[in-house]
Image (cartoon, rainbow, N blue to C red):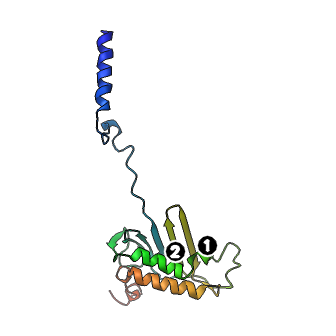
Amino acid sequence: MKKISLFACAGLFAAAGCASGDYEPWVTKGVNPPKPEQHDTFTLERTACFGVCPVYEVIVDDRDILEFRGRKFVTEEGGAVGERLPDGSYGKLLAIAAAYQFDAFDAAYPNENATNCPQRVTDQPSVIVGFNAGDRARTVSVYQGCIGFDGQDRFNAMIAEMDAVLDIGDLIGPREAFLGGGQ
């Protein structure tokens, strides 16, 4: 009997070795899901203020796929909306960042000690811009109540050009809709 069971086990192992590379036993199915494809990304986020400021995050990957995550005071609130941008949009966002010297901005305005923010007003949103490319990631967070910092005009111009590439006005919606002026 022992000889038969040893041969049976050897046969099982030999047969298991012939299984395809995609084979996964039913007992472990879903335990080790495949890792999702990694893409370089650009993010633009706008945070809340005291009022009806649009609160959302936009992610654009290197395939020119945009994901809009509306949180508050936007037309597309809750969940995520995806759409394909024109070819080369991600590259345009990179080129805009380079033209406005994105890497020269501080990581945050104001910084931890508020030494880079000469004047502050309260209840304003923040704009957070980031790139994650390969092993390099960079994020700049600007509280819009931080006034008069070095490069503020350059930052605002950069954001305006990025907004034009993203073209998400229809996802944000008109402010009048949130001020009680109509829908």
- Please name whichever residue, 146 or 179, is drawn nearer the observer in this view of the structure: 146
What is the quadrant of the C terminus in the image?
bottom left
Q: Please tell me which residue is depicted at 32% across the width and 39% down the height of the picture.
A: 24
Query: In terms of image quadrants, where is residue 173?
Result: bottom left
What is the quadrant of the N terminus in the image?
top left
Q: In this view, does 103 lie to the left or right of 21?
A: right
| Residue 153 x %, y % | 57, 88
Closer to the N terminus: mark 2 or mark 1?
A: 1
Q: Please tell me which residue is depicted at 32% across the width and 20% down the height of the picture.
A: 9
CA separation in Å, label 2 and label 1: 10 Å
Mark 2, secondary structure of its residue: strand
Q: Is residue 120 left or right of residue 69?
A: right
Q: Label 2 amino acid?
A: Val
Q: Please tell me which residue is depicted at 32% across the width and 72% down the height of the picture.
A: 83
Is 164 above or below relative to 5? below
Q: Residue 49: in sight, yes or no?
A: no
- Please name whichever residue, 33 or 169, is drawn nearer the observer in this view of the structure: 33
Could you say which disc has been placed on residue 64 in the image? Answer: none
Crowd rating for badge 1 (residues with CA inside 10 Å; few <14, some 14–19, many 20+): some
Crowd rating for badge 2 (residues with CA inside 10 Å; few <14, some 14–19, many 20+): many
- The residue pinned by badge 1 equals 107
Report the number of discs.
Answer: 2
Q: Residue 176: in sight, yes or no?
A: yes
Q: Please tell me which residue is depicted at 48% across the width and 78% down the height of the picture.
A: 95
Could you say which disc has been placed on residue 129 in the image? Answer: 2
| Residue 80 x %, y % | 36, 68
Is 6 above or below relative to 31? above
Q: Label 1 amino acid?
A: Ala
